[in-house]
Amino acid sequence: MKTKTIILIAIFVYITAPGCEKKEQTALKRNPKAQALYEKMIQVMRDAQTMYYESAYECEELEGETIPKSNYRIWLKKPNFARVEVEQEGDLRGVIIGDGKCWWSYWPNKRPFFPWEDSIEYVKTCSTSYTKEHLSLGLYSIAHLIGNLRINMGMPILQPSVFYNYPDHLVKHVDSVICLGTEKIGEQEYDVIEVSYMNHQRSKYYWLSKVDHLPRKLKQVIRTAETYVSHELWSYIAIDMEIPDEKFTWQPPEHWQEYGFPQKRDGLLNPGTEAPDFACKGVDGSTIKLSDYRGKIIIINFWRVGCPPCRKGIPYLEELYRKYKDKGLVVIGFNCDDDLKITLCLLKEHSVTYPNIVDASGEARDVCYRQYQTIRGKSAVPLHYLIDKEGRVIDAWYGLWGEELLYQALLKAGLK
């Protein structure tokens, strides 16, 4: 009876959550001029045979706390060549090279210390390590590779892999493209557009040149429990310039070693492990405690509003919950990153009835990012755990399982 009470209260909150209706109306705005400007920017990049630009990148994080400024240079050449160099405080901190067969990443001076490393081993390898990944033409995100350098720089605001016709996973979630007028920078006048994603959870702003249709100034705002703002200034842009193939070649020096990042799955709890108990705040402000559901089969879904696979999985989990809740299945959503109002709007959109934790406290984040993902610094969502009636882990996985595989796992867990 306790579970049903929580669900009924949650439904009431979803329906009456303030601001949802306003955001849904905002999402319907489509300005033809702004849409044309946005599409032209993308098309110019895709039509180019080579492209070079430099960018000054800055990120404001956690109420004004600023990450060190970065400058990066990027060379792109079709069909599948790329080079990125990132500088901070005058030092070359990281290099990425796509040579047509592999992606190489290395740190010319010293790679950063990763949270999962042994300090003694780090000293031995920090100046002589690189990574190597096989190239997937048109399916590889240079922005994510830059983020993987882990040199205190977030991902670029505009995905460089657009140049290769990369299917950016955020494109499907664009809900608004509007004009914000024009602005003069130096002697040039620029069209300013805003591209909104996922009911304004994320916004990107572009100051587009009237000459070549490419941005000179970029801004991104990500709205979670905190607001993250990043800025870029592009300069020295060149389209279809001559770039020799030698620019995209690199071989590790003698005695250098390939560095292997731990896999995210390595940090998941093993089957048979007792699932750590937690008591966190639900959507209605009440406490959801894992141990209160002992005797039931539980799926815990760690998710974020700004994660496209997470959003895709919500209606699937709702359907699963409605289908099997009377047979002893409980689904618990767990969001420790997002603003409550934004989260409630999404849950309302999908008519979610299963219990959801929306708690950005340090305790809740510790549950998600330390207790259920045990390698510090290696975490992701969507993450799912299947827990048996005695509170032990049956399995854990990232992404969504196929319906038949999950159903077989539920039967194994004792679903009747």
Image: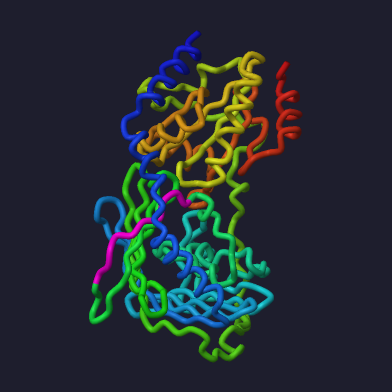
Compared with residue 190, is residue 221 higher up or lower down, i.e. above or below? above
Q: Is residue 17 left or right of residue 303?
A: left
- Is 71 placed above or below 113 here? below
The structure residue drawn at horizontal position 71% and vertical position 19%, both measured from the top left corner, is 415
How far across and how far down the image is residue 92, in percent?
Answer: 42, 79
Which one is in front, 163 or 113? Answer: 163
Highlighted range, magenta: 174-183
- The verdict on residue 116 being magenta is no
Q: How many marks?
A: 0
Q: Visible in this render: residue 129?
A: no
Colour convention of the picture: rainbow
Residue 192 seen by the camera: yes
Q: Residue at x 45, y 42 (%)?
A: 305
Query: Who is closer to the viewer here, 52 or 118?
Result: 52
User: Residue extending furthest top?
Assistant: 1
Q: Is residue 33 left or right of residue 352?
A: left
Given residues 259 and 147, the one toward you in this image is: 147
Secondary structure mostly taken by the magenta-highlighted segment of the chain: strand
Quarter of the image for residue 129 reads bottom right
* Rendered image quadrant of residue 24: top left
- Residue 67 location, quadrant: bottom left
Q: Position of residue 391 (x, y in %)?
A: 60, 23
Task: In this rendered view, identify the residue nearer to me: 167 or 356.
Answer: 167
Which residue is found at the position 59% from the left and 55% from the top?
A: 262
* Residue 178, horizontal then vertical, whole percent: 36, 56
Q: In the current view of this chain or complex, which residue is farthest to the front?
A: 32
Measured as percent of width and height from the top left, residue 363 is found at 39, 34
Tell whether position 179 is magenta: yes
* Quadrant housing the C terminus: top right
